[in-house]
Image (tube, rainbow, N blue to C red):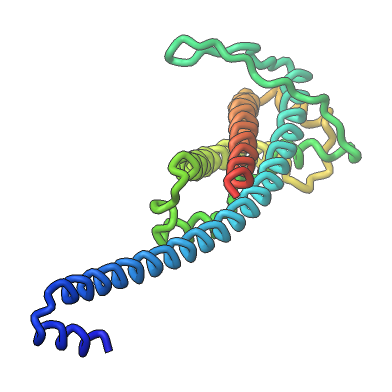
Amino acid sequence: MLLRRVIQHVKTQNWTAVALDFIIVVVGVFIGIQVANWNDARADNSRIERRLENLADDLRADIVEIEYIAKTAAWRSSAVVEVLGRSGHQQAQQYETPNGTVIEPLPVPDYEAKLPTSAQNAMTWLSTLDGNRGAYEALVSTGDLHVMENVDLARRIQNYYARADEVYDQDRAHQDGRDLVTNSLHRNGIGILSNVTMDEIVLKVRGDLQLAADLSTLHALDDQQRVNMRELSDEANALISLIEGAK
C-alpha cells in the first residue's frame, strides 16, 4: 500500500508527500533495526548471565577442591617436619628470594594420626589442582568473554584462570618432588602400606642424607602449594562476589 501511495505521489509530483513517505520508511527501518539489536543484546546478556552463574558454580567447586588440597598439604607438611625434626634435620626458619625478600615458611600443625603406621602415607599423599573450567571455556569459545559489558569482571576472570594454569604447572613440579621422596623411601624398604612406625622412619632418615634432603625439598614445595591455594581461594571468592554483584 505504501509503495502504491509513493507511486501515486510521484505521478502527481507531490514531492512533499514523497518526502514524508520516504521519512516514514527510513524511520520504520531504523526502528526495526534498533528493536532487532535490542532483542539480540537482551539475548546476549541473558546467555552471558547464565554462563556467569555456571562460572560461579565452577568457582565454588574449585574452592572445595582447593580446601582439600590445602588440608592435605598441611597434613603432609606436619609429618615431614615431625620426621625431620626428630631425626636432627631442622628446616630453616627463613629463606631469601633473588630480589632480597626474606620469607618465613607457613606455620605447620602438629602431626596427628590415628594409626601408628600412617607417617609414610602422610608424607607422600599429594593432591593437585584439576579445576573446573567448563563455564570458562564456554565463555572463551563463544566469544562471550570479549563482549561482556563489565570489562573489569572479564579481566578478573581471565586473570583467575591464568593463575590457575600457573598453579597447575607448579603442581606438576610438586609431583616430581613427591616422587623423589617416594623413591627414597622405597630405597629404604618403605612403601605406602608398609607396617613402619614414625620411630622407624626417623631412624632411616638419620642414616640417609638423600632421604632427608628429599623431605626438606618436599616441605618447601608443600609450603608453596599452601600459599598458592590460599591465594587462589581468595581470588575465587572475590570473583564469586563480583559475579553476584553484577546481576
Residue 83 is situated, as x and y percent measured from the top left of the image, at: 76, 25
Q: Nearer the viewer, residue 156 or 173?
A: 156
How many numbered discs sit on the rendered protein? 0
Residue 67 is situated, as x and y percent measured from the top left of the image, at: 71, 41
Q: Mark yes or no: residue 169 visible.
A: no
Q: Which quadrant of the figure has residue 225?
A: top right
Q: From what the image shows, is residue 81 above or below residue 185?
A: above
Q: Mark yes or no: residue 209 visible.
A: yes
Q: Residue at x 59, y 36 (%)?
A: 235
Q: Is residue 108 left or right of residue 139?
A: right
Q: Is residue 21 left or right of residue 201?
A: left
Q: Residue at x 42, y 63 (%)?
A: 38
Q: Residue at x 78, y 19 (%)?
A: 86
Q: Nearer the viewer, residue 89 or 55?
A: 55
Residue 89 is situated, as x and y percent measured from the top left of the image, at: 69, 17
Q: Residue at x 35, y 71 (%)?
A: 32
Q: From what the image shows, is residue 242 above or below residue 48?
A: above
Residue 49 is situated, as x and y percent measured from the top left of the image, at: 55, 57
Q: Is residue 47 left or right of residue 178?
A: left
Q: Nearer the viewer, residue 101 or 63?
A: 63
Q: Quadrant of the N terminus?
A: bottom left
